[in-house]
Amino acid sequence: MRWRIVTATKPATAVVPQRIAIVGGGPAGLMAAEVLAGAGLGVDVYDAMPSVARKFLLAGRGGLNLTHAEAPDVFVTRYGPRRAEVGAWLVEFGPQQLRDWAQELGIATFVGSSGRVFPHEMKAAPLLRAWLHRLRAAGVVFHARHRWTGWDGGGALCFATPDGGEKVGAHATVLALGGGSWAKLGSDGAWVPLLAARGIKVERLRPANCGFDVAWSEHMKQRYAGTPAKNVGAALMAPDGSVTRHAGEFIVTEQGVEGNLVYALSAPLRDAIETAGSVVLHVDLVPGRDQRRLMEDLAHPRGRDSLANHLRRRAGITGVKAALLHEVATPFDLAAPERLAAILKSLPLRLVAPRPLDEAISSAGGIDFAALDENLMLRAVPGTFCAGEMLDWEAPTGGYLLTACFASGRAAGLGVVRWLQSAHGRLQP
C-alpha cells in the first residue's frame, strides 16, 4: 500500500496548534468533536463511510427516538450492570441536557405518550444537518472514506483511503467506532483485533436489541411471517425465580420473533440461551383478563360454534394469536377450558438462538472498563480515548442507547481536555 504522511509544518518559532483526531463520525464521535472544538482545539473527524452518522440517520428514519423522559433514578437503571459507569456520564449530560442541546440547534422536542422523546419533525436528518453546520463553523474538518487500520510503530494513526494509505499524527485521539451491528453502515467491529493486539481487553461483541429464532411450523412461517402480535404481554423468569414483565407487541418473522417487546428482554433472553441452549418466553395473549375470568368465559357452551369462532367470541383470539396458540397447544389443551385459559395467559414460546449480530439494532460487549481510566483514556495507549457503543455497556431501545452515546462522547472529549491540561500545563489552541 502507498502511504501518505500527514504532518503539521510550521516555522520552528511558531506554536504548533494541537490537533485532535476523532475516528468515527457517529453521535459519540461528533459530540467529542463539539466539546474539543469548543475548547479551541483543532479537530479532524475520520470516518470509513462516504458520509458521517449513517446509522444515526437510519435509526431516525421511522422517527428519531432521541431520549426518554423518565426520572433520572429510573433512567439509569436501564443500563443494568453498567449503571454506575454510564450514570457518571449522565450526571453531566443526561436526557434533559440532550433536549436542551437539540433546542440550541433549533430542533424542538416533545414527549410521546410512552415517555419517549422525539424531535417535532420526527426525523434525524434536520438535526444532523444543523449539527454538522455548527461543527464546520467551529473549524471541525471531516475526512470521508478513511478506514482506520491501527497505529504504526511510532504511534501515528494509519488509514486506508481510496488514494492509498495515510498516516496521521495527533496530539490525542478519540476512538468512537461503534459496535458490531449494521456493518454496511460502518459499525462492523473491525477495530476489535486492532485493540486486542495492543493487549487491551475487549469483551466479545454480541447482539443486543435483537430478534430470536423460533422453530415455527411451515404454516406459521408461510402464513404469518411479518405479522404483528399486538396488545400482548411477556414474562421471563430469571434463575433466581424473579420475573420480568413487559407489555406491547412483537412481530412474527420467518425465523422467529422481533420487535419492541422482544428487544426489551433481549439481554436476559440472549444470556439465558448462552447458558442453557434455549429459553422459554411466556406470552400473555389476553392481558386484559385474569385467568379465572378467562376460564369462565371459555367454559360457556360452544353450541354449534367452531373452536375458532368460540375463541374469537369468548377471548378475542383470532389471526396470529390463534396461530400462536395452535403452535403450542395439544388437542387435549384445546378441549379443556382450564388448560386453554392457562395457555392463553402464559403461552410458552421457546426461543433457540438470537439473530446474527449484524442484524441487531446494537451490540453488547466491547472495551472492558478496566482498560480505561476515569477520563475514558486507554491505560495501554496514553492519549487515546474511547466513546460510544465500542465500550462494554448495553441498553434497550427507547432513547437509552442514543443518550448514552452522546453522553460518552462528551465525557471522552472532556477527558481529552483534562489530559492535555495535565500533560502540557495549558492548551494550545
Image: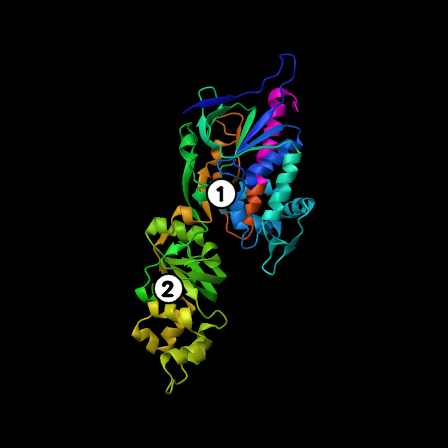
Q: Is residue 163 above or below residue 62?
A: above
Q: Position of residue 7 (x, y in %)?
A: 55, 20
Whether residue 391 is visible here, answered yes or no, is no
- Whether residue 276 sits left or right of residue 84 in the image: it is left
Q: Is residue 290 above or below residue 427?
A: below
Q: Position of residue 67 (x, y in %)?
A: 59, 50
Sequence-first disc among 2 and 1? 2
- Whether residue 208 sits left or right of residue 334 in the image: it is right
The kind of secondary structure element at disc 2 is: strand
**The one of 328 and 43 positioned closer to us in this rendering:** 43
Which residue is label 2 attached to? 348
**The one of 98 and 151 positioned closer to us in this rendering:** 151
Residue span colored magenta = 407-429
Q: Amino acid at mark 2?
A: Pro
Other-residue count near label 1 (Cα within 10 Å), few / some / many at <14 / 14–19 / ≥20: many
Residue at image position (44%, 43%) is: 184
The stretch drawn in magenta includes residue 409 = yes
| Secondary structure, magenta segment, majority class | helix
Q: Are marks 2 and 1 in contact (CB under 8 Å)?
A: no
Q: Position of residue 132 (x, y in %)?
A: 61, 39
Where does the N terminus fall, quadrant-wise? top left
**The one of 49 and 307 positioned closer to us in this rendering:** 49
> Which residue extends farthest bottom?
303
Which residue is label 1 attached to? 393
Q: Amino acid at mark 1?
A: Trp
Q: Position of residue 62 (x, y in %)?
A: 54, 55
- Whether residue 363 sits left or right of residue 117 in the image: it is left
